[in-house]
Amino acid sequence: GAVVSQHPSRVICKSGTSVKIECRSLDFQATTMFWYRQFPKQSLMLMATSNEGSKATYEQGVEKDKFLINHASLTLSTLTVTSAHPEDSSFYICSARGGTSTYEQYFGPGTRLTVT
Amino acid sequence: DQQVKQNSPSLSVQEGRISILNCDYTNSMFDYFLWYKKYPAEGPTFLISISSIKDKNEDGRFTVFLNKSAKHLSLHIVPSQPGDSAVYFCAAGRGADGLTFGKGTHLIIQP
């Protein structure tokens, strides 16, 4: 149980284009989903928190107009990186909390974004 | 300001022995802590958690100890196996907030 998937696993895009990353909880309903980013040899940094049916809450320093988050259902959240730049190249990971867990978060496999 | 610290970037342990991974935190408002195992280019895998009202939680080979007065927690793996080689992240959370992660410790299990 507690499986989270992400799609795509890897994407290369050109500077100025937008990329959408999907995060799904496969066997439980996720009341809350989170998006993290990890740069090489760094820790995971929380970008935003999304609750189903409401606006996402962004961490300080994360541009909400650049990183659009939609949590349309209890099993799906999407992150859209708009007008991507090379500095947005990173490993994006989502997590989900819900089901029987009170506070444990289960992570997806991550998406490697490379902006050329 | 780093609220969760893992001061050992790497740790080498012989197979069969005990692995002890340490984590310190500064925010006394955290009310739960988790350990994750991670391989490169993969998402973290949940291992074990502990609520701030407890001082120990055990699950198979994994035991987490929490010392609130010292703001310190540790993960013990006994016995260590080759498949345990990975990067281990300590994470802390409060209420419904997202997690704050340490920088990770690369555990290497030697045969």
Image: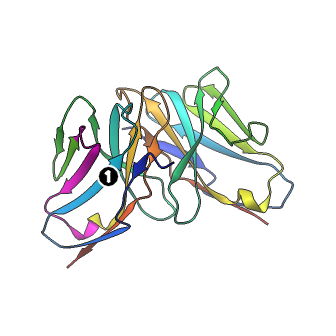
Q: Indicate the secondary structure of the residue bearing disc 1.
A: strand
Image quarter of residue B39: bottom left
Q: Residue at x 48, y 42 (%)?
A: A4
The residue lying at 33 percent from left, 34 percent from top is B32
Task: Give percent across and percent down for residue A2.
Answer: 40, 38
Nearer the observer, B70 or A96: B70
Query: Is B68 one of the magenta-colored residues?
Result: yes
| Magenta span includes A27 | no
| Label 1: chain letter | B
> Residue B86's x, y, as percent?
35, 65
Q: Where does the magenta region start and end?
A: B67-83
Residue B13 left/right relative to B93: left
The one of B104 and B61 positioned closer to us in this rendering:
B104
- Tell me: A98 left or right of A48: left
The residue that appears at 16% across and 43% down in the rendered structure is B58
Question: Dot 1: within a 10 Å radius of its alpha carbon, few (fewer than 14), some, or many (20 or more) residues?
Answer: many
Residue identifier under label 1: B23
The amino acid on which the numbered mark 1 sits, given as a three-letter code, is Cys
**From the viewer's perspective, is residue B89 above or below residue A24?**
below
Task: Residue at the far bottom: name it.
Answer: B111
Q: Position of residue A43 (x, y in %)?
A: 50, 56
Q: Residue at x 77, y 62 (%)?
A: A86
Residue A15, given in percent of the width and then of the height, sits at: 84, 60
Q: Quadrant of the C terminus of chain B?
A: bottom left
The residue lying toward the viewer, choosing from A36 and A70, is: A36
Q: Quadrant of residue B106?
A: bottom left
- Residue furthest to the top in view is A53
